[in-house]
Amino acid sequence: MLSSFAHDAEHVVEMDDVPPRGAYALPPPPAVPRGALERMEAQLREAIFTRSTSIASEQRVLRAAFRAIDLDGSGNIDFGEFQAALERFGLHVAASGLKGVGGISQDIAKAFFDRFDTDGSGFISLQEFSTRLLDAPDRPQFRRL
């Protein structure tokens, strides 16, 4: 086995200089305060349903909300679109959206996004969005009057 690789006469990389496999692993996700994501999810759910003026089914309300959040019409929500939606629904994201201080951190916004992105694709599909908001075991039941 080769112990070095010569790129040219001046540059040689020794195998000892190459970090071991897995040395570039991603840092662990940030610690999220207990109950923070559940409270954010409840707030988002309430904002979506209270802004609906129709007597439509929950699924139809969520489809309409999803289309409004999916700004580029791709059929998926990316993290930027998700952050913009949080702003529109009253959940200010620090260093994004509205000017001012405070709000939820980017790390917590990403953890909240990941809660919806169950397949880890980096995008939220309509199915993931609906499932998270309708089938969550901690979801309160809303009644229309």
Image (cartoon, grey):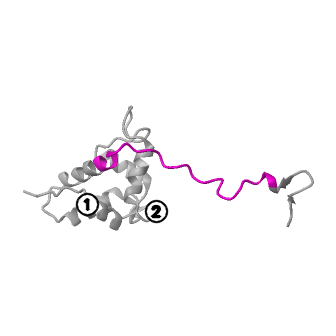
Work out whether residue 33 can be spotted.
yes
Specify which label sits upstream in the sequence, 1 or 2: 2
Q: Which residue bears the numbered disc 1?
A: 137
Asked if residue 59 is positioned above or below residue 24 in the image, the reply reads below
**What is the residue that sits farthest to the right in this orientation?**
9
Residue bounds of the magenta highlight = 16-40
Predominant SS along the magenta part: loop
In the image, is residue 99 part of the stretch drawn in magenta? no
Q: Residues within 10 Å of mark 2 (few under 14, many from 20)?
A: few
**The N terminus sits in image quarter:** bottom right
In the rendered image, the vertical position of residue 145 relative to residue 33, given as above or below: below
Residue 28 image offset from top left, x and y in percent: 52, 49
Q: Secondary structure at mark 2?
A: loop
Question: In the rendered structure, which amino acid carries the disc numbered 1?
Answer: Pro
The front one of 13 and 76 is 13
Instruction: Indicate the position of residue 111 as horizontal and vertical percent values.
Output: 42, 50
Q: Position of residue 52 (x, y in %)?
A: 18, 55
- Badge 2 is on which residue? 120
The amino acid type, in three-letter code, at marker 2 is Gly
Q: Quadrant of the C terminus?
A: bottom left
Q: Quadrant of residue 31?
A: top left
Q: Name the front one of labels 1 and 2.
A: 1
Please state which of residues 84 and 13 is positioned toward the viewer in this rendering. Answer: 13
Q: CA distance from mark 1 to mark 2?
A: 21 Å
Rendered residue at 25%/53% (across/down): 45
Decide which of 64, 141 is in the foreground and name it: 141
Report crowding for label 1: few under 14, some 14 to 19, many 20 or more residues within 10 A (C-alpha): few
Residue 29 painted magenta: yes
Q: Is residue 64 visible?
A: no
